[in-house]
Image: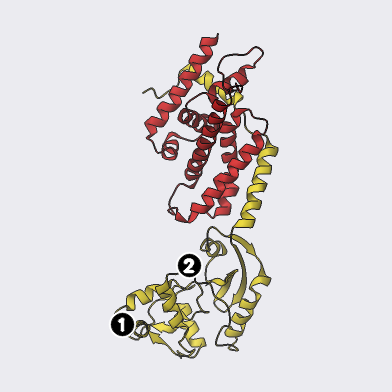
């Protein structure tokens, strides 16, 4: 097999390049606009915003089903990268106002429970049931991973429970920080600055002195 | 980090359009712009439908080219069938007609190449893809992609020289 083209072959390539010209710019632009328009009409829309909080900049995102992401202690690009990659993103502080208002009330100790529709459709049914149980833990109290597993009727599933809690897309709103290890340590926390944030949240709620 | 779908449109729309233009637009139909535009939309529609199934470490550019190639093949098959049914349509007649420009003549000869050779040649020398990418797009080895390009050039040269 020859790897290099002969002089005649190279001349043919040059002729081809001038014969099979690039498409007219106007046609390319028209097509790009039309693909973008189709994408805008088809792709799910995620609206997001940010707010200052005692835990640093806090990002929130909503879709048509409800709140779909909360994160803090990360860069904006990292937060956006974790959202549904198929979705169209739009920064829209108004669209997330209800969420940010409730979070501000929570940080000011004026609110202990959130009243928001939440979209957990990216999770498995098991992960969803773990988060449902986490929602039952009262502010100021903590449960162990084992207790959550017991509540689910699967007392030997402490580890999968921990893994499911780590997938919580809306920390603080679904209080996975209220679940700790049986040995008295805090266990893990995937939100923002990790255990430091978990400790801070538990102190805010009065579960830790 | 894998790209977001809207980044794929931003980064690759223009080259996919150009690729389809060169691969299918050669058919010299009056409504070629519309046809290529329609085909480009189909590529991104198919990509959108399968986007979440793709592995995070995939080569997204090669994947788009693969979809575009499959769409173009289907289109070329359709055009070929149409021409075969319509005996009066002589667009792919490879004999020279008087007054035909050399460039147009070359386009006609490229149209007459086997689809795979045409795709390999277009990707290598007009879209500047490397052979490993072409191999992954066409599910063949790098050597096979190289051989297809080489055969296409030989064939074109032979046709041109025969007419002199």
In primary-sequence order, the first of circles 2 and 1 is: 2
Q: Quadrant for the N terminus of chain A, please.
A: top left
Residue A122 drawn above or below residue B40: below
Regarding residue A195, the answer to whether it shows in the image is: no
Q: How far apart are the alpha carbons under marks 2 and 1?
A: 25 Å
Relative horizontal placement of residue A77, taking residue B120 as reference (left or right):
right
- Circle 2 — which element? loop
Q: Are marks 2 and 1 in contact (CB under 8 Å)?
A: no
Q: Which mark is residue A155?
A: 1
On the image, numbered disc 2 is attached to which residue? Answer: A122
Rendering quarter of residue A53: bottom right
Residue A195 drawn above or below residue A92: below
Residue A137 drawn above or below residue B75: below
* Chain of the residue displaying label 2: A
At 41% from the left edge and 83% from the top edge, which residue is drawn?
A: A179
* Chain of the residue displaying label 1: A
Q: In the image, residue B104 lies at what x, y percent? A: 62, 21
Q: Residue furthest right?
A: A26
Q: Which chain is red?
A: B
Q: In the image, residue A153 lies at what x, y percent? A: 34, 83
At 53% from the left edge and 18% from the top edge, which residue is drawn?
A: A11
Q: Colour of chain A?
A: yellow
Instruction: Count residues near mark 1 (Cα–Cα under 10 Å), then give few for <14, some for 14-19, many for 20+.
Output: some
């Amino acid at each position: 097999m020859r790897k290099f083209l002969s002089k005649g072959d190279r001349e043919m390539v040059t002729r081809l390049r001038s014969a099979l010209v690039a498409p007219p710019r106007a046609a390319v632009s028209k097509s790009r606009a039309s693909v973008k328009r189709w994408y805008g009409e088809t792709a799910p829309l995620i609206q997001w915003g940010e707010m200052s909080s005692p835990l640093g900049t806090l990002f929130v995102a909503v879709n048509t089903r409800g709140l779909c992401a909360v994160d803090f202690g990360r860069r904006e690009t990292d937060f956006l990268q974790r959202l549904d990659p198929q979705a169209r993103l739009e920064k829209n502080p108004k669209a997330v106002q209800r969420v940010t208002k409730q979070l501000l009330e929570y940080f000011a100790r004026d609110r202990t429970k959130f009243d928001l529709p939440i979209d957990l459709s990216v999770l498995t049914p098991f992960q969803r049931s773990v988060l449902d149980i986490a929602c039952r833990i009262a502010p100021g109290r903590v449960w162990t991973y084992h207790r959550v597993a017991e509540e689910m009727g699967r007392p030997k599933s402490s580890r999968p429970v921990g893994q499911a809690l780590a997938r919580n897309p809306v920390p603080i709103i679904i209080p996975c920080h209220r679940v700790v290890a049986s040995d008295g340590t805090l266990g893990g926390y995937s939100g923002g600055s990790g255990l430091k944030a978990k400790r801070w949240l538990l102190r805010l709620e009065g579960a830790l002195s | 980090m894998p790209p977001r779908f809207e980044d794929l449109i931003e980064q690759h729309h223009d080259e996919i359009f150009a690729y389809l233009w060169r691969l299918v637009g050669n058919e010299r139909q009056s409504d070629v712009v519309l046809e290529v535009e329609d085909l480009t939309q189909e590529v991104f529609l198919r990509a959108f439908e399968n986007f979440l199934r793709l592995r995070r470490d995939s080569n997204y550019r090669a994947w788009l080219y693969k979809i575009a190639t499959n769409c173009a093949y289907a289109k070329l098959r359709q055009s070929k069938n149409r021409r075969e049914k319509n005996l009066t349509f002589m667009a792919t007649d490879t004999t020279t007609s008087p007054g035909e420009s050399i460039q147009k003549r070359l386009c006609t000869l490229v149209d007459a190449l086997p689809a795979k050779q045409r795709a390999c040649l277009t990707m290598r020398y007009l879209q500047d893809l490397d052979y490993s990418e072409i191999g992954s797009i066409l599910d063949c080895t790098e050597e096979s992609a190289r051989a297809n390009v080489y055969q296409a050039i030989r064939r074109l040269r032979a046709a041109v020289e025969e007419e002199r």
